[in-house]
Amino acid sequence: MSAKSDALEMAVTEYIQARTALDAAPGQRTRAQADRSFMRLAALAAPRIRYFTRSYGLTDVAEDAAQVCAIALHRAAERYDPARARFTTYVNWQFRAELQALRHRLHGDQRCAGRRHVTATLSLDALQEDGTGDWLVDPAAESATEQRAADNLAELMAARLVGDWAARRRAGLRRTRGGDDRIEIRVAAEQALVRDHLLVTEVAERLRESERHVVRRALADIVRHAASRKLH
């Protein structure tokens, strides 16, 4: 493995140790150590994030790409299992998934852009006359499509609500703490936590008390702003 990969592996190990210490003894000192460890991990991952941002053609929205990659990095560090894979391999897939999703949201599916296609047209009438059209019928297709559409709508709504909350959270922290470099890291981590809570119900069973406090506060803020929008 390269020196950069080894450095990234050491950095995530230090972060995991810092998070373990924070869980065992919550406090300002252990919190600061965990934040410093994550900042070092983020600094080492920054060139990799820039590379993937260019690869996915997202340099025009580099700030958005950096934010989704910060979420991916935090999630990867929280869930990383050294026994299963190297961290570089694991986090690369997390970056790719988030950037691909961002590109799809912004520009649609570009996998076929610039390619020429030859499409073979089949006659549905001919298939039905021959009695071979039965394979086209899927009794579960309608319900499955409706369920997937509902899931997609729920995901989009959750992402919008959590994104709006994160913007308010970031603005509030900047008003009280000024230009602290750790604000963006903290907001990205909290945003990933709240989003996972909304989309993956069983995650609530694994939350620490400090994380449950963040989620409860975020949900209360989301509900309050959603209600005020409805009234207006």
Image (tube, rainbow, N blue to C red):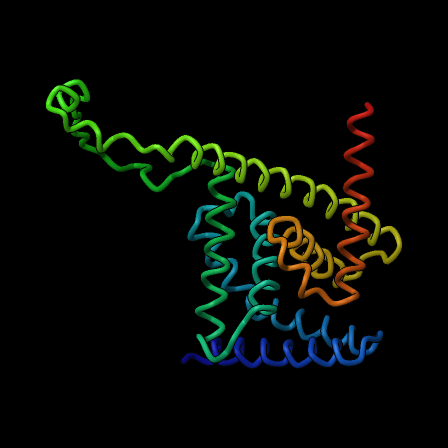
Q: Residue at x 81, y 45 (%)?
A: 220
Query: In front: 119, or 143?
Result: 143
**In this rendering, is residue 171 above or below 78?**
above
Judge from the rendering whether residue 51 lies leftward or rightward of residue 188; answer left or right: left
Q: Residue at x 44, y 49 (%)?
A: 56
Judge from the rendering whether residue 153 lies leftward or rightward of residue 143; answer left or right: right
**In this rendering, is residue 13 above or below 97?**
below
Instruction: Name the quadrant of the N terminus.
Output: bottom left
**In this rendering, is residue 30 above or below 120?**
below
- Residue 191 % position (x, y): 68, 53
**In this rendering, is residue 3 above or below 96?**
below
Instruction: Name the quadrant of the C terminus.
Output: top right
Query: In front: 167, or 157?
Result: 157
Q: Residue at x 67, y 57 (%)?
A: 193
Quarter holding residue 27: bottom right
- Residue 52 % position (x, y): 46, 56
